[in-house]
Amino acid sequence: MKWSVSFYEEFEAEFDELPEEVQDEFYAEAQFLEMNGPATGRPHVDTLKGSKYPNMKELRFEAMNDEWRVAFAFDPKRVAVMLVGGGKVGMSKERFYKGLIKKADARYARHLEKLKQEEKSKKEEKGKKR
């Protein structure tokens, strides 16, 4: 079974600003994730400890002499939603992850709320058709 990977809207704009080499490495890892889904483990994916969400993960890769991490979570629709990312070089590990997790948790909360609203709208539409 192939899994889906999508970009959270704000991250998509941020991603577009990254150097091509970083984007290429990301896409290679994302393809691996699409093939293996939640079973993907290290060195490609690891759990982000400290998140409010137990399913919050990080996609891990190296590009341009930096260690890159992209926070993501598999949502209820079985889509790996890429939320936020960045390079770790030049920043303390603690500071990097604190910022990454804070932003990822906030974006994932908004993503889940949007899914909930879409589901509610679908149910209301079904009710009107009866």
Image (tube, grey):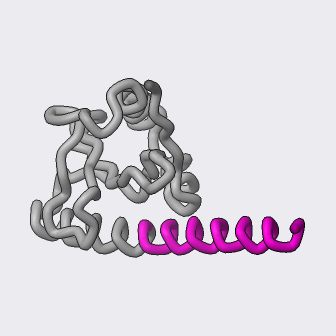
Q: Main secondary structure of the magenta part?
A: helix
Number of residue marks: 0
Identity of the residue drawn at 23% across and 62% down = 54
x and y, in percent, of residue 78 in the image: 45, 46
Identity of the residue drawn at 57% across and 71% down = 116
x and y, in percent, of residue 3 in the image: 45, 34
- Front-lying residue, 122 or 36: 122
Specify whether 78 is left or right of 10: left
Residue 76 drawn above or below residue 36 = below
Residue 26 drawn above or below residue 128 = above
- Front-lying residue, 124 or 71: 124
Q: Is residue 111 located in the magenta-colored stretch of the structure? A: yes
x and y, in percent, of residue 17 in the image: 52, 49
Specify whether 75 is left or right of 95: right
Residue 77 drawn above or below residue 116 = above
Give the residue furthest to the right.
129
Specify whether 103 is left or right of 130: left
Identity of the residue drawn at 54% across and 62% down = 10
Q: Quadrant of residue 39?
A: top left
Residue 102 drawn above or below residue 66 = below
- Front-lying residue, 98 or 44: 44
Identity of the residue drawn at 44% across and 31% down = 27
Residues rendered magenta in the picture: 108-130
Tell me the quadrant of the picture where the C terminus can be found: bottom right
Residue 21: tell me if it is visible. no
Residue 113: tell me if it is visible. yes
Q: Is residue 117 located in the magenta-colored stretch of the structure? A: yes
Tell me the quadrant of the picture where the N terminus can be found: top left
